[in-house]
Amino acid sequence: MKIAVISDIHSNLVALEAVMDSIRNEGVEQVICLGDVVGYGARPNECVEVIRSNEIPCILGNHDEAAIGLGDINYFNQWAREAILWTSINLNEKSKEFLRGLKFTHEIDDIFFVHASPYEPKSWHYIFSEYEARLSFSSFKQRVCFVGHTHIPAVFSEPDGRRRIINVGSVGQPRDHDPRACWELYETDKESFKLVRVEYDVEQSSNQVISGGLPGFLADRLKSGI
Ligand code: ZN
């Protein structure tokens, strides 16, 4: 089975639509979203609607949690905090209800899905390094764990190479100095995986951020992929 894993859309509808087109072209049978559907960008309700109407299984991200008034917003940086407050004001009731229904983890056969880390999923730990990845392998039993949260695509393997933690990068705000949107294609029978990069109209999305009244830095960072 071909699975597409997407994460960290962050209210970037232009990027999400480009990614959904790319996924359709690959003949994917199942799409999974690792959360942070909202926060940072200017189209939160539209992005939630894409996930909801396509019946894409979705798990909760830290920005989703904060935008519906759960969780502590004090640990977010200034821009994230401003965007969360903007998002909580602009989310409609239908979107809030959708986000309230999201769980912290998801499983399909031998695959585990979580937003940040399989170790204490509700604490939003980051996995940036091999060391942090190594500490996380004992927190799930499946062959593969997909994560997002850092917005930086990565693959971490156990020393014997049998199990992996795969970071799928970000649809709506990549931070690896490549502004193209990310999604991960996983083929279950071959256990093969491929990061797909998708060009989208970054200018349009940046303009939406500005005209929505969000901080200018959030528009600029999309252009440089930071
Ligand atoms: Zn995120």
Image (tube, grey):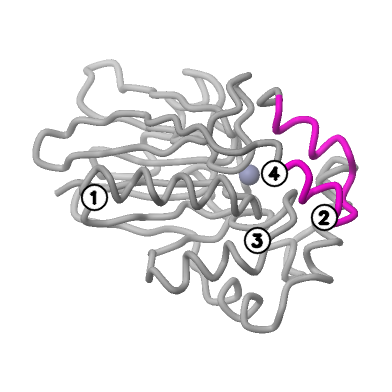
State which image quarter holds ligand 1.
Answer: top right
Using a 10 Å C-alpha cutoff, classify the residue at mark 4 as few (fewer than 14 neighbours), some (14 to 19) or many (20 or more). few
Which part of the image, by quadrant, shows the C terminus? top right
- Under mark 2, the amino acid is Ile
* Mark 3, residue position: 64
Q: Nearer the viewer, mark 4 or mark 2?
A: 4
- At horizontal 44% and vertical 29% (from top left) the residue drawn is 197
Per the model, the C-alpha gap separating discs 1 and 4 is 27 Å
Q: Position of residue 100 (x, y in %)?
A: 60, 75
Name the residue carrying label 2.
73
- Whether disc 4's CB lies below 8 Å from ligand 1 is answered no
Residue at 69% x, 44% y is 204
User: How far, Cα to Cα, is label 4 from label 2?
Assistant: 28 Å
In three-dimensional space, the C-alpha distance between marks 3 and 2, rounded to whole angstroms, equals: 11 Å
Q: Residue 111 magenta-drawn?
A: no
Q: Which residues are magenta?
A: 206-223
Amino acid at pointer 1:
Val
In the rendered image, the vertical position of residue 67 relative to residue 189, given as above or below: below
How far across and down, in percent of the image, does residue 98 sit? 56, 76
Tell me the residue that label 4 is attached to: 204
* Disc 4 and disc 2 in contact, CB within 8 angstroms: no
C-alpha separation, residue under disc 3 versus residue under disc 1: 26 Å
SS for callout 3? helix
Q: Helix or strand or loop: what does disc 1 sit on? A: loop
Query: Which dot, 1 or 2, sits closer to the camera?
Result: 1
First-in-chain label (4 vs 3): 3
* Number of the label disc, if any, that sits on residue 28: 1
Which label sits in the foreground, 4 or 3? 4
Direction from residue 3 to residue 33 in the image, left or right: right
Name the element at disc 2. Answer: loop
Mark 3 and mark 1 lie on one chain; the one further toward the N terminus is: 1
Residue 30 screen position, x and y as percent? 26, 57
